[in-house]
Image (spheres, grey):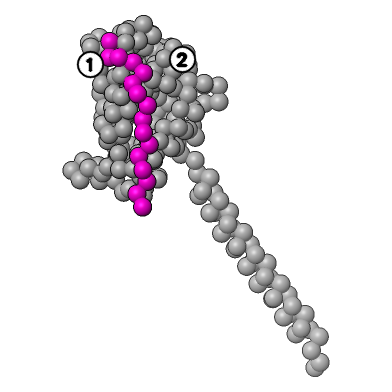
Amino acid sequence: MAEMARPRSSPRFTTPEAVALHENVSPDRWCVTRSDLIYLRQDVWRAIKCGEVRPLADSDAFELSDEKYGPNIHTVNKQYIMPVTDEAGKVSWALMRHPDGLDCHLFISHAWLEGVFEFLSKVLHSWPSRSQHAWCCMLANPQNLNIGSYLQSPSRSPFAQALQASTCVLVVPNRHCSIYTRLWCGYEAYCAHQEGKTILVARASNAQQLTYALFWVSISGLLGMTCGECSRQNKIHTKIQPT
């Protein structure tokens, strides 16, 4: 039986209120928490199971059962973030959850080609312990408003302001291409270098691989001990046989 879609709440803002909110809250404060990203992972998975997020044959034919990679960020933005924030009055996902904004500690740079679960697993695993809030463009920018109006001057864009306010930059690689094929990622790298930011490269946890390796090492060790004991017993048996 198909899982029923969860009803969404009524919009929290009118569109003029959403525009005003993004004007009044400094762009570097359009941030989310680590808990927000855990919730995002759960809710995107729910949306996939409910049929709200669907594969696109021509651009993103992801497997519905794929919890490792999942739909790419372009698909998630179009089929999940934009509908959710549209119902909230066209405010960004970050300000929908934190209307007063949050101080920016971590700036996340990514290319949008990675699967959402790949992205989230890498970010959550690599999240610096001293960072409480992160700025991530897909969640920070109001996807249903005129984003172009915020980007007319790169040096004064939300990207630049958030990066300047952050302590460090987390670069999220993907299996498809270098993130620096995306122009904004190249600009972010330039700004981070110019401002002397600490740059970290995100990676997923290898706990599963380590567990698998330890399992087989243990099995090999037990087999070795068993074979050694059998060999020892055979030698003892040979020595005590009457001549």
Q: Is residue 139 visible?
A: no
Q: Position of residue 202 (x, y in %)?
A: 44, 32
Above or below for 77 versus 59: above
What residue is shown at x 69% (from left), y 76% (from top)?
A: 231
Instruction: Check disc 2 and give the amino acid type.
Output: Leu
**Which residue is nearer to you in this view: 112 or 169?**
112
- Residue matched to label 1: 146
Mark 2 crowd level (few <14, some 14–19, many ≥20, 10 Å Cα): many
Does 185 appear above or below 207?
above
Please tell me whether mark 1 sits on a helix, a strand or a loop.
loop
Q: Quadrant of residue 119?
A: top left
Left or right: 24, with 105 as reference point: left
Magenta region includes residue 198: no
Numbered circle sitting on residue 102: 2
Q: Is residue 238 left or right of residue 154?
A: right
Measure how far apart labels 2 and 1 are at the Cα level: 22 Å
Q: Position of residue 186 (x, y in %)?
A: 30, 23
Query: Residues at badges 2 and 1 in contact (C-beta under 8 Å)?
Result: no
Find residue 230 and report its horizontal and vertical position in percent.
Answer: 69, 76
Residue at image location 47% in from the left, 33% down from the top: 38
Q: Decide which of tag 2 and tag 1 comes sooner along the chain.
A: 2
Secondary structure mainly formed by the magenta segment:
loop
**Label 1 Cα crowd, 10 Å radius (few <14 / some 14-19 / many 20+):** few
For residue 72, say whether it is visible: yes
| Magenta span of residues | 1-16
